[in-house]
């Protein structure tokens, strides 16, 4: 405890309150007031002076009409800019999605290839084990037959005959396997040839049906045209001007001549169009 300091303790239950030192407090207060006065004097001494600027025309060198026109043009172009920005965003997003899809496809393709290769190896091993087992079983069976038929032969003769018999059986097995593969290949080729023939036959039938439908449609149009031509021909028309070269005859003769000439023209037009259609599709 410093010199000259008298502590007066106040008991407040479980706590003890110590009053401050008046001398120390007064000294700190004087130092703080002096620092505040020094700060105020420094601010007064360093106070900025009045600002003097050269007057100038604000708003730039452009006129109000030009500025409004430019603003309107930017407003119009902003729609296209937003649209282009949206299209660019969608394009980038679509490209990213396509790249992701291609990446996933490549991963799945790689997995499928590995799985296929694994299955092929397993099938090859299984086939090899089956061939070996079949070869061993066949060899044992043939050896039993050989031992029953050649009891009196020597050991060397038996060994050589066994090797030759095993080679012959192996060669025969390979020949049978090769023939089976050739037979399967020939059957697949025959199936492909039949499919190609059926496809070609179907295409020819569709082409023939299309040509027939086109011919029927053309024939219908031509018949309608000829019917309209026949219905529109009236007495006193151009088709009667040269029937008999004589205008002085009875009404029955006139109608007969007109009907004959009209039927002749209709028949001629019909034959001409049918001839054109037949030669066009031939």
Image (cartoon, rainbow, N blue to C red):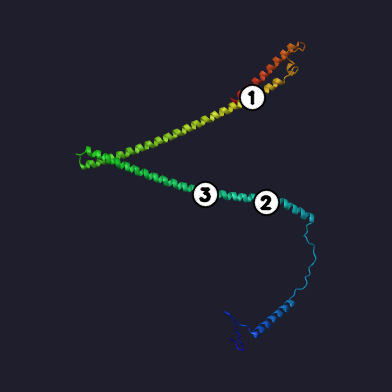
The residue singled out by tag 2 in the image is: 82
Residue 210, placed above or below residue 62? above
How many angstroms separate mark 3 from mark 2 (CA)? 32 Å
The image quarter containing residue 169 is: top left
Q: Quadrant of the N terminus?
A: bottom right
User: Where residue 192 sits in the image (x, y, percent)?
Assistant: 46, 34
Q: Nearer the viewer, residue 53 or 130?
A: 130
- Classify mark 1: residues with Cα within 10 Å, few (<14), some (14-19) or many (20+): few
Badge 1 marks a residue whose secondary structure is helix
What residue is shown at x 44% (from left), y 47% (from top)? Answer: 115
Image quadrant containing the C terminus: top right
> Considering only order in the chain, which callout, 2 or 3, is on the residue closer to the N terminus?
2
Q: Residue at x 63, y 22 (%)?
A: 274
Which residue is identified by label 1? 220
The x and y percentages for residue 80 are: 69, 50
- Image position of 250 (left or right of 142): right
Q: CA distance from mark 1 to mark 3?
A: 57 Å
Classify 10 Å Cα crowding around label 3: few (below 14), some (14-19), many (20 and above): few
Which quadrant would residue 135 be assigned to in this image?
top left
Q: Do callouts 2 and 1 mark residues in contact (Cβ within 8 Å)?
A: no
Of residues 54 and 81, the one nearer the viewer is 81
Looking at the image, the residue that sits furthest to the bottom is 4
Instruction: Work out whether residue 188 or residue 10 is closer to the camera in this orientation and state it.
Output: 10
Q: Specify which label sits upstream in the sequence, 2 or 1.
A: 2
Q: Residue furthest front?
A: 13
Disc 3 designates what residue? 104
């Amino acid at each position: 405890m410093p010199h000259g300091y008298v502590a007066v303790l106040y008991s407040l239950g479980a706590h003890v309150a110590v009053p401050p030192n008046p001398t120390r407090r007064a000294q700190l207060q004087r130092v703080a007031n002096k620092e505040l006065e020094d700060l105020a004097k420094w601010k007064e001494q360093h106070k900025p002076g009045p600002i003097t600027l050269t007057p100038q025309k604000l708003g730039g060198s452009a006129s109000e009409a030009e500025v409004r026109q430019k603003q309107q043009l930017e407003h119009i172009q902003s729609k296209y800019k937003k649209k282009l920005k949206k299209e660019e965003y969608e394009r980038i997003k679509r490209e990213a999605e396509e790249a992701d899809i291609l990446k996933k496809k490549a991963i799945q393709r790689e997995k499928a290839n590995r799985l296929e290769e694994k299955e092929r190896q397993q099938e090859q091993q299984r086939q090899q084990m089956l061939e070996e087992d079949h070869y061993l079983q066949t060899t044992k069976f043939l050896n039993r037959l050989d031992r029953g038929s050649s009891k009196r032969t020597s050991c060397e003769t038996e060994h050589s005959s066994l090797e030759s018999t095993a080679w012959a059986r192996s060669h025969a097995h390979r020949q049978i396997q090769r023939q089976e593969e050739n037979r399967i290949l020939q059957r697949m080729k025959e199936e492909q040839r039949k499919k190609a023939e059926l496809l070609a036959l179907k295409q020819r039938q569709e082409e023939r049906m299309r040509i027939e439908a086109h011919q029927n449609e053309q024939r219908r149009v031509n018949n309608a045209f000829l019917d309209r031509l026949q219905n529109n021909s009236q007495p006193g028309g151009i088709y009667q001007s040269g029937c008999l070269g004589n205008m002085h005859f009875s009404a029955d003769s006139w109608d007969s001549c007109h009907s004959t000439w009209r039927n002749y023209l209709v028949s001629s037009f019909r034959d001409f169009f049918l001839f054109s259609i037949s030669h066009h599709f031939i």
